[in-house]
Image (spheres, rainbow, N blue to C red):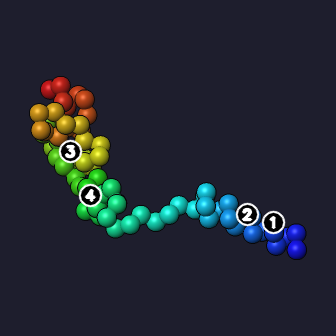
């Protein structure tokens, strides 16, 4: 009987404090389309190298691959 009580307490702690509740459809911060935005590739204005949008440096609305290309 004691083991059932201990297992029950552990299950309650897990479900109330540890397990994350799924987000409802309306409360999601990002849409699936926004999630894949970082996978887009853009060309550097200076050298033409393609880099992911997450890694790109932006200056005056133009994308650059490195600080050196941004300075030139």
- Left or right, 30 with reference to 64: right
Q: Are marks 4 and 1 in contact (CB under 8 Å)?
A: no
Q: Quadrant of residue 67?
A: top left
**Label 2 vs label 1: CA separation?**
6 Å
For mark 1, does the 10 Å Cα neighbourhood hold few (<14), some (14 to 19), or many (20 or more) residues?
few
The CA span between labels 4 and 2 is 38 Å
The residues tagged by marks 2 and 3 sit, at their Cα atoms, a distance apart of 54 Å
Tell which of 37 and 10 is nearer to you.
10
Q: Residue at x 70, y 67 (%)?
A: 11
Q: Nearer the viewer, mark 3 or mark 4?
A: 4
Marks 3 and 4, the one that precedes in the sequence: 4
Distance from label 3 to label 4 (Cα)? Answer: 23 Å
User: So how many labels did they put on this image?
Assistant: 4
Q: Position of residue 7 (x, y in %)?
A: 78, 68
* Mark 3 neighbour class, 10 Å CA radius: few under 14, some 14 to 19, many 20 or more: few
- Residue under label 4: 34
Q: Which residue is mark 2?
A: 10
**Residue labelled with disc 1:** 6
Give the mark, 4 or 2, whose residue is nearer the N terminus: 2
Residue 62 versus residue 30: which sits nearer the camera? 30
* Residue that sits furthest to the right in the current view: 1
Q: Quadrant of the C terminus?
A: top left
Residue 61, by quadrant, is top left
Quickly name the residue at label 3. Answer: 49
Residue 68 in percent (x, y) is at 23, 28
Residue situated furthest top in the rendering: 71
* Between discs 2 and 3, the one toward the N terminus: 2
Which dot, 3 or 1, sits closer to the camera?
1
Dot 3 or dot 1: first in sequence order is 1
User: Which residue shows up at 25% across the image and 48% down it?
Assistant: 53
How would you rate the neighbour count of disc 4 (Cα within 10 Å): few for under 14, some for 14-19, many for 20 or more? few
């Amino acid at each position: 009987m004691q083991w059932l009580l201990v297992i029950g307490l552990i299950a309650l702690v897990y479900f109330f404090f540890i397990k994350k509740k799924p987000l409802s459809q309306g409360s999601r911060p990002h849409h699936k389309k926004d999630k894949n935005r970082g996978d887009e590739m853009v060309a550097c204005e200076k050298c033409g190298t393609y880099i992911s949008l997450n890694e790109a440096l932006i200056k005056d609305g133009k994308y650059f691959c490195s600080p050196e290309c941004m300075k030139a």
